[in-house]
């Protein structure tokens, strides 16, 4: 006895600062009065303490010109986070695709993701997923976009228009003809919310009703007799996608022709004396 010693210490949370060596110190003395011998952890291969894993400051930020929480095709989303000791990552995905996180110290991580079509559903949040593990065997931590300290990033696909329709209130044929006083109605749908500008129907400013329905009342002088009634407008969404729509470039759209009021030119002549 007295020659082989064993000390046991159970690590408790908060006792030791994360990512530091576990310190110890002892001094051995004998009954003969030899010079005491002191030893510390600095003289041995260190044992590094790693606290339970925590993901800190997880952020997703887009370089979109409108807002950092919006993204369209071509925008770059930067994902960052940090930990208090080195970790390794697995099962890393952004928008459902494998992502490349990089770190110089294993604690400060960054990934860049360039937004492309068909990887995130239109008008949905860009997804994120990864699992962090450490060398000490702490329980791995899985993170996703719901854990970001910033706003989640919403994806806006390119604007698409569907169900484009034009018709008039003409009693003879609402899909082909219009006369003075007839109302021209143009309706359509978009894949997500947009803002319209530059609305023109029959070369005049058009009015806009709820549900993307444009209504224009034909007036004499708006168009030459027998002219086609055309329309155009611009669209932009929150993320900065734009689309210009013109009736003459819309495939499969019926055309309506304007008939001005009938005018007769009469003349009478005589060859008598």
Image (cartoon, rainbow, N blue to C red):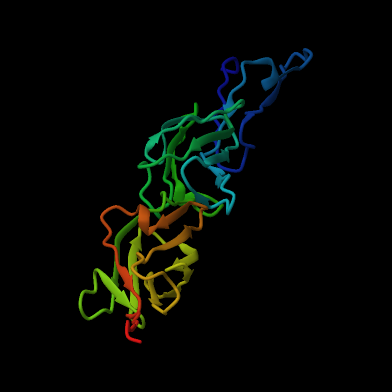
167 is higher (above) or lower (below) than 6 = below
Classify residue 272 as left or right of residue 146: left
Q: Is 20 in front, or is 258?
A: 258
The residue at the point 60 percent across, 18 percent down is 2
Classify residue 129 as left or right of residue 182: right
Residue 140 in view, yes or no = no
The residue at the point 35 percent across, 49 percent down is 121
The residue at the point 22 percent across, 81 percent down is 171
- Percent x, y for residue 42? 70, 19
Q: Is 3 in front, or is 107?
A: 107
The residue at the point 38 percent across, 69 percent down is 212
Q: Is 114 in front, or is 92?
A: 114
231 is higher (above) or lower (below) than 158 = below
- Percent x, y for residue 144? 44, 45
Query: Which quadrant would residue 232 be assigned to in this image?
Result: bottom left
Q: Which residue in the rendered view is the most extreme toward the left? A: 172
227 is higher (above) or lower (below) than 172 = above
Query: Which quadrant would residue 250 be assigned to in this image?
Result: bottom left
Residue 19 in view, yes or no = yes
Tally the numbered discs. Answer: 0
Q: In the rendered view of the protein, which quadrant contains the N terminus? A: top right
Query: Which quadrant would residue 108 be assigned to in this image?
Result: top right
Q: Is 25 in front, or is 34?
A: 25
- Percent x, y for residue 242? 48, 53
Q: In the rendered view of the protein, which quadrant contains the C terminus? A: bottom left
- Percent x, y for residue 235? 47, 59
Classify residue 271 as left or right of residue 107: left
């Amino acid at each position: 006895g007295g020659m082989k010693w064993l000390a046991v210490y159970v690590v408790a949370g908060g006792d030791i600062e994360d990512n530091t060596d576990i310190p110890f110190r002892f001094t051995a003395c004998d009954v003969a009065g030899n010079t005491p011998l002191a030893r510390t952890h600095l003289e041995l291969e260190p044992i590094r303490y790693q606290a339970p894993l925590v993901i800190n400051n997880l952020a997703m930020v887009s370089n979109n010109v409108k807002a950092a929480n919006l993204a369209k095709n071509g925008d770059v989303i930067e994902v960052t986070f940090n930990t208090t000791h080195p970790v390794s990552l697995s099962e890393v995905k952004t928008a459902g695709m494998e992502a490349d996180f990089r770190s110089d110290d294993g604690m400060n991580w960054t990934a860049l993701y360039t937004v492309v079509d068909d990887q995130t559903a239109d008008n949905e949040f860009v997804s994120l997923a990864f699992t962090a593990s450490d060398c000490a065997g702490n329980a791995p931590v899985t993170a996703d976009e719901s854990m970001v300290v910033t706003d989640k990033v919403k994806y806006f696909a390119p604007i698409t228009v569907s169900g484009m329709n034009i018709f008039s209130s003409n009693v003879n044929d609402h899909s082909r003809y219009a006369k003075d006083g007839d109302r021209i109605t143009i309706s359509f749908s978009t894949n997500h919310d947009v803002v319209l500008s530059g609305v023109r129907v029959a070369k005049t400013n058009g009015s806009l009703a709820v549900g993307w329905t444009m209504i224009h009342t034909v007036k004499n002088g708006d168009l030459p007799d027998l002219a086609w009634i055309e329309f155009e407008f611009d669209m932009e969404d929150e993320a900065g996608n734009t689309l210009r729509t013109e009736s003459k470039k819309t495939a499969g759209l019926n055309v309506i022709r304007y008939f001005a009021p009938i005018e007769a030119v009469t003349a009478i002549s005589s060859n008598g004396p």
